[in-house]
Amino acid sequence: EIVLPSKIAVRDFAGKLSLPVTELIKILMKNGILASQNEQIDFETASIIAEDLGYKIRKEEEAAGAKEEELERVREKIDKGREMKAIPRPPVIVVMGHVDHGKTKLLDAIRKTHVVEGEAGGITQHIGAYQAEKNGRKITFVDTPGHEAFTVMRSRGAKVADIAILVVAVDDGVQPQTKEAIEIIQAAKLPMVVALNKIDKPEANVEKTKKGLSELGLIAEDWGGKTVMQQISAKKEINIDQLLDMVLLVCLLYTSPSPRD
């Protein structure tokens, strides 16, 4: 049995459940709730999550009858939504890559053309997330810092995502943070789409970059491998639509029970 207040921070709630904060954030996201570790969730939401995990709930200073009816009403709504499964949760995409390889430019290019109207920054600025729309489907993007000092934060970002986009600049090739990002993505067992960025630059060398990635086990489809790669220029907004098409394809292949769903 755990006692919950009317509102509780995600970090404190994780402590009561004896869970890592990242694991609780992942559970919340699976239930359609995007919240950072410092944000608060209400008692009803926390109760449903905790009960699903096997805990008995008691509210601080509870008014038993009224609150139980309210909790039951919320539970029925969530259960009904789970049963219907008419609208799937938008897939969560984490964007990773070496510093200065164009991750921010890519996110800016997607924002410019595909962000849901009125949605920019509206999901939660605390975790740097926003939604884009392509072919009538919404996609949630989670930004992750590029500097090596934020290794842990990038790792947490990967753990709450469904798919990763690895940005690699073809004028610079595989770099230390590229390798680090690949290790994080693979450790999180995430499907991956590689964005081969900066194809507009004179010194761009796509084949050399593919060779460097192949040495790390990422072999492009046109080389006989299974890694989806898309050449882009985030700066000039070249092939951004094609990249999102690849992301949606990978979503269908890896996040649905079957590709037809």
Image: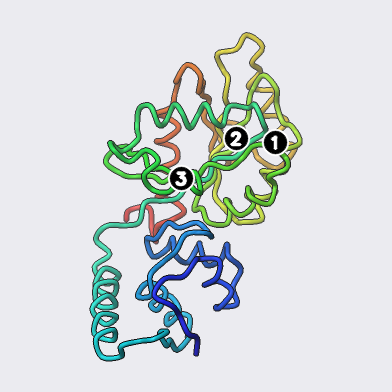
Q: Secondary structure at mark 3?
A: loop
Image quarter in which the C terminus is found? bottom left
Q: As displayed, is residue 62 above or below residue 214?
A: below
Of the residues shown, which amino acid type is indicated by label 2? Answer: Ala
Q: CA distance from mark 1 to mark 2?
A: 8 Å
Badge 2: few (under 14), some or many (20 or more) residues near its Cα, within 10 Å?
some
Q: Which residue is mark 3?
A: 125
Q: Mark 1 sits on what residue?
A: 214
Q: Point out which mark residue 123 bears.
A: none
Q: Position of residue 168 (x, y in %)?
A: 63, 30
| Separation of marks 3 and 2 at Cα, in angstroms | 34 Å
Q: Are marks 1 and 2 in contact (CB under 8 Å)?
A: yes
State the residue position of label 2: 220
Between tags 3 and 1, which lies in front? 3
Q: Which label's residue is closer to the chain start, 3 or 2?
A: 3
Q: Residue at x 76, y 36 (%)?
A: 176
Give percent across and percent down for residue 55: 48, 86
Callout in the foreground (3, 2): 3
Amino acid type at image mark 3? Gln
